[in-house]
Image (cartoon, coloured by chain):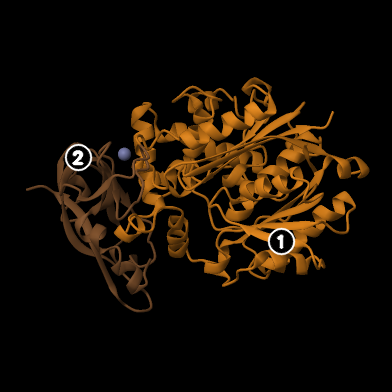
């Protein structure tokens, strides 16, 4: 049995000082329902990571149903760090495949602007083992910097090579109406930004962002009855790894990402060559090339060289992060993967407007929790 | 992890690098484990990491972090311990220019952070260049 996407809803990613988490969720959710012409669903799933820390709110599933005007539906909230969104989609899709539900609305929502910069560093570190990483005063940012350093040395790369990825993210975001940063930057912008943990600079990381995105998942039977543009979720791949990269044999080797992509491609019955665009989790700049290499879209150490040749641009061979990714569109943590999936839906249904990838039939969306402790990949395809 | 009781439970590792070592494959895990994450063996015994190792890489963290606002910037190191385990911790008693990859380092217990509300001070191991 297949799972279809029948509508999406996106709020602009921004620092929404005036708007609450539930207001953002409602806007995205209602817009997804409206785009499919549906009034109600069997279940709602919320992807969110930090609401108990930042908004002192749990029980988000029922709250989301309430703000949508729904009562008596099944609901839950999913947390799997940075991969929460795709984990939520996996959960919702499973319930459709099992026959439990026919229509499930998945929303990803996060309000990071309620945290100070100092708190944000501590929050992202909660994806790492608190018992022996944070307790020694080590943040995920510091771990990321150490992995970045090893990546540069191992493959003989310069920071300028990796800086191409934030530049690409901003380039693609400039025409994305829902993106946080709709302006271009240059390699110099990245290289002139201050270090946060060398070799990581300010522009190698993402900034606090608020936003909500929703995708409506449908059974085949229901999808056939609705008039909205549809896409099919053809492949799912999920894989865990040890929480701290330094407990793995090789911290630079992201095998969870490799497994996730491999499994999703196998399930979809597609080769890498038939994937028309890729959305990767560039929570830190170097995670983009590292992910492309781990998934086999580039040779180890070569994703940056491919970048220079234009391979990942919108008009390139394998367009990457077509609406800017986490860097350009923004990274409202629990919502980020849902934005990526919604953007991929716009691509394969031919509704990506200025960001449209010519002939986009199949796309791969990848998400990562922490520094590879959990990776997810979903393959979306046009409905022929 | 800044509640006094939860931090108290971590003392064996954060003060002494104690944990569970797999008798079958030798892999070390911080604190208490029931199953070896590498080989699946349930034969684990309490052990302690060696107090010395080799510096692999370090980073100077300039972005302030909650609880450590007052001691930013600070150095975080990736150290290969003498048994092959990897430990990531802060460096102390040195300047970045004193550090070179592959140099010998050793552990020492120092102040890690101050909790914002309770003003409790948390201690744990850091690395310093070996004498
Ligand atoms: Zn073992």
Helix or strand or loop: what does disc 1 sit on?
Answer: strand
Element assignment for label 2: loop
* Quarter, ligand 1: top left
Q: Nearer the viewer, residue B97 or A301?
A: A301
> Is residue A183 or residue A87 the one in the foreground?
A87
Q: Is residue B117 above or below residue A115?
A: below
Residue depicted at x 87% and y 49%: A36
Figure quadrant of the N terminus of chain B: bottom left
Q: Residue furthest bottom?
A: B118
Is A303 positioned to the left or the right of A90 in the image? left
Assess disc 2: are there few (<14), some (14-19) or many (≥20) residues with their C-alpha within 10 Å of its C-alpha.
Answer: some
User: Which residue, given by chain and number where applicable, does mark 1 sit on?
Assistant: A75
Is B123 on the left-hand or right-hand side of B5? left
Palette colour of chain B? brown
| Residue A259 picture location, percent across and down | 53, 32
User: In this rendering, does residue A187 appear at all?
Assistant: no
Give the colour in which the image draws chain A: orange
State left or right for residue B100 relative to residue A118. Answer: left
Q: Which residue matches tag 2?
A: B83
Question: Which mark identifies residue A201?
Answer: none
Residue A99 position within the rendered picture, expressed as x and y whole percent measured from the top left? 78, 46
């Amino acid at each position: 049995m297949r799972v279809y996407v029948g509508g999406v809803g996106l709020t602009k990613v921004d620092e929404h000082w005036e708007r609450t988490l539930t207001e953002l969720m409602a806007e995205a959710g209602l817009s997804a329902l409206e785009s499919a012409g549906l009034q109600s669903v069997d279940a709602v799933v919320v992807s969110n990571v930090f609401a108990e820390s930042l908004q002192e709110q749990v029980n988000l599933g029922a709250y989301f149903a309430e703000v949508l005007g729904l009562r008596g539906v099944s609901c839950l909230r999913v947390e799997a760090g940075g991969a929460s969104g795709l984990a939520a989609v996996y959960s919702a899709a499973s319930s459709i495949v099992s026959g439990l539900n026919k229509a499930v609305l998945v929303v990803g929502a996060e309000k990071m602007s309620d945290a100070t910069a100092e708190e944000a560093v501590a929050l992202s570190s909660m994806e790492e083992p608190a018992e022996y990483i944070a307790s020694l005063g080590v943040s995920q940012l510091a771990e990321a910097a150490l992995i970045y350093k090893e990546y540069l040395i191992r493959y003989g790369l310069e920071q300028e090579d990796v800086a191409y990825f934030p530049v690409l993210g901003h380039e693609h975001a400039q025409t994305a109406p829902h993106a946080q940063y709709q302006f271009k930057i240059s390699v110099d912008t990245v290289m002139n930004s201050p270090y946060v943990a060398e070799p990581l600079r300010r522009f190698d990381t993402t900034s606090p962002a608020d936003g909500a995105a929703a995708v409506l998942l449908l059974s085949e039977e229901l999808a056939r009855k609705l008039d909205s543009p549809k896409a099919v979720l053809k492949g799912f791949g999920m894989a865990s790894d040890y929480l701290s990269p330094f407990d793995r044999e090789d911290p630079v080797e992201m095998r969870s990402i490799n497994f996730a992509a491999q499994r999703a491609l196998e399930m979809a019955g597609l080769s890498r060559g038939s994937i028309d665009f890729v959305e990767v989790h560039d929570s830190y700049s170097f995670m983009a090339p590292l992910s492309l290499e781990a998934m086999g879209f580039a040779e180890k150490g070569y994703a940056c060289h491919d970048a220079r040749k234009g391979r990942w641009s919108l008009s390139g061979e394998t367009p990457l992060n077509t609406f800017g990714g986490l860097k350009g569109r923004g990274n409202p943590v629990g919502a980020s993967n849902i934005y990526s999936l919604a953007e991929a839906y716009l691509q394969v249904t031919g509704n990506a407007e200025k960001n449209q990838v010519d002939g986009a039939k199949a796309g791969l969306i990848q998400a990562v929790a922490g520094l590879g402790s959990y990776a997810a990949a979903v393959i979306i395809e046009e409905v022929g | 992890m800044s509640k006094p009781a939860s931090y108290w439970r971590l003392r064996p590792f954060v003060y002494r690098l104690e944990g569970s070592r797999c008798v079958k494959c030798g892999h070390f895990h911080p604190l208490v484990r029931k199953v070896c994450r590498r080989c699946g063996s349930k034969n684990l015994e309490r052990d302690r990491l060696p107090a010395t190792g080799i510096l692999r890489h370090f980073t100077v963290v300039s972005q302030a972090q909650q609880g450590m606002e007052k001691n930013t910037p600070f150095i975080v190191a990736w150290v290969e311990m003498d048994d092959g385990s990897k430990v990531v911790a802060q460096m102390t008693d040195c300047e970045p220019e004193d550090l070179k990859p592959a140099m010998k380092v050793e552990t020492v217990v120092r102040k890690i952070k101050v909790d914002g509300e309770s003003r409790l001070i948390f201690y744990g191991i850091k690395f310093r260049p070996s004498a």
